[in-house]
Amino acid sequence: MSQLTKRSLVEQAVDQLRDRIARGSWSIGQRLPTEPELASDLGISRNTVREAMRVLAFSGLVEIRQGDGSYLRTVSDPLQAVQAMSRCTVEHARETRHILEAEAIGLAAMRRTEHDLQQLREALQHSAAHFHSDIPAYVACDIQFHQLLVDAAHNPALSELYRYFSGVVAAALQHNMSTVPRCQAVFDLHAEIVDALEQRDPQRAKHLSRTLIES
């Protein structure tokens, strides 16, 4: 019963925060009140506020910046788009990755910075530590790596689209890794993609990306 009550409180908090966002209580880019302030204002615990903010962050409404607070990203709730994506077939997801991810990685090969490469190699190290063990941990690391690949294209629209779509990618990856034996050669494609970006070779980067998507 306590779990049901807790879930209900979080849902109520989410609804109240969505309503305030819709009514224009905060402007896009504005830092939201702190957890203690929201807890006091809504009459709920800080833990409930924290969980509600995570829900809003997942749906794309807010951005949580570690050590800095939460900021309003948009007033248009993209949750419906995310839900629609979650209903797409495996084949539709694969087609979308070819169009969105592979092409973005081609751009990244031309636009990447040294900082992008450093972040990608660090993310790849985190992924490698979990590839042969903890599937959920690996999936989280791998999604972060692929988001960084798309971010290296330095196109905010592509980054946002992939951020919403990454939930579909994560679900497919989780299923695949749970049913198919893990292959080191497939994982090694990730490092080859980073090498292609370092060499500023968009055609090779796209080819490797498509090979990885089909693996």
Image: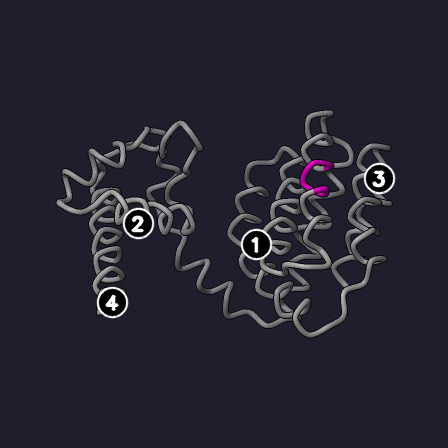
Mark 2 and mark 1: span between their CA atoms?
A: 21 Å
In the rendering, at what x and y percent does residue 182 appear?
Answer: 76, 65
- In the picture, the quarter occupied by the C terminus is bottom right
Q: Is 23 within the magenta?
A: no
Q: Which mark is residue 196?
A: 3
In the picture of the structure, the residue carrying the numbered disc 1 is 166
Of the numbered discs 2 and 1, the one sitting upstream in the chain is 2
Q: Residues within 10 Å of mark 2 (few under 14, many from 20)?
A: many
- Give the SS element for disc 3: helix
Region in magenta = 121-125
CB-based contact (under 8 Å), mark 1 and mark 3: no
| CA–CA distance in space, label 4 to label 2 | 15 Å
Disc 2: which residue? 52
Mark 2 secondary-structure assignment: helix
Per the model, the C-alpha gap separating discs 4 and 1 is 28 Å
Q: Write down the quadrant of residue 138 in the picture.
A: bottom right
Q: Helix, strand or loop at disc 1?
A: helix
Whether the residues at callouts 3 and 4 have beta carbons within 8 Å, the answer is no
Q: Nearer the viewer, residue 22 or 53?
A: 53
Amino acid at the residue labelled 1: Ser
